[in-house]
Image (cartoon, rainbow, N blue to C red):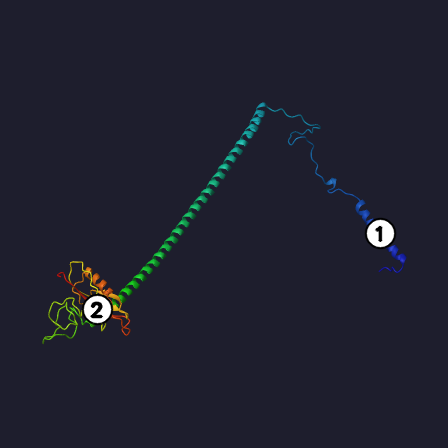
Amino acid sequence: MFNLDTKHKRKSAALTTVIMSLLLVLMFYVGLTYLDPPEEYGIAVNFGTTDFGMGNKQPTKELAPAPVKEEQVEEEVKEVMEEQVEEPQVQEETSKIEEITEDVATQNNEEAIAIKKREDDKRKAEEEAERIKKENERKERIEKERLERIERERQAKIAQQKAEEDAKRKKLDALIGGVGNSNGTDKGGEGNDNQAGDKGKVTGDPNASGYYGNGGTGSGGDYSLGNRKPLNKPKPIYECNEEGVVVVAIEVDVNGKVIKATAGVKGSTNTAQCLLSRAKEAALKTRWQADSDAPFKQTGYIRYRFSLSQ
């Protein structure tokens, strides 16, 4: 646009730019002033010294205050005093109402909190009581199951012991030939007559060959343990007013020691406790011949006869 190929042209252009900038600045700050809004556009207001008035004459000075009647002054003073008196009363009553409202709100809040706390405590107590009840029921159920299990085990053990005793009793009965059997279920018989039966006495020895007499505690069949003989024969202590026969089933080991004795088995004619206990004591003290070929527990019997007449 401009040809500024020489040094002088460039200086002239720079100087012109500076001068124009200065002129613009001067015109902005030193230019003509004007009013905003212009004075001629205002609204004319009548001269006066009060906010009220009447008449057509324009006074040039401030008017003297109009005379005030005494009644009007008293009424104004009274109104001012009433306003001054009523305002504190209203404020005081307002303050009291606010205080009462605040107290009522506070009381309502405290009462609501107390009620909620009581309800929470009651609910917690009910939950704790329910938990304790369930825990007690659980313990009672466990204890009941434990007692029932113990009772079943006891009954099973009793049944097992009874079965073992019945088996031993049957074995002993078979060994001694069913002495004293009163139900008449044994088969066979023994005697020198032509009539069926088992000739002898219930107080006799099933291994004895005689059929007559009173029986008694003589030697021979009173002790029976297969082919093994007793080494000693302790007599039972006789200290009660009872008499009769007591048969004691015994179990003997290979060394000849009686390891078990059951008094009052089949063949006994008197099962008084004083006779049974003494017969058992004597049987346990009896020693037998040792036999390494004998069963580990060989069964046999001892028959004791207690008599009041000596």
- Foreground residue among 112 and 173: 173
Tell me which amino acid carries mark 2: Tyr
**146 or 264: nearer the eye?**
264
In the image: residue 267, left or right of residue 252:
left
Asked which quadrant contains residue 294, the reply is bottom left
Residue 195 x %, y %:
10, 75
202 in relation to 111, above or below:
below
In the rendered image, which residue does mark 2 sit on? 301
Based on the displayed image, in which of its 4 quarters is residue 51 positioned?
Answer: top right
The residue where tag 1 is placed is 18
- Asked if residue 31 shows in the view, the reply is no
Q: CA distance from mark 1 to mark 2?
A: 154 Å
Residue sitting at the far top:
70
Residue 93, placed above or below residue 208: above
Which residue sits at x=50%, y=37%? Answer: 99
Residue at the spot 34% in from the left edge and 58% down from the top edge: 143
Q: Give the percent coordinates (x, y) of residue 92.
A: 52, 33
- Say above or below: 36 vs 143: above
- SS label for mark 1: helix
Q: Is residue 14 visible?
A: yes
Q: Residues within 10 Å of mark 2 (few under 14, many from 20)?
A: many
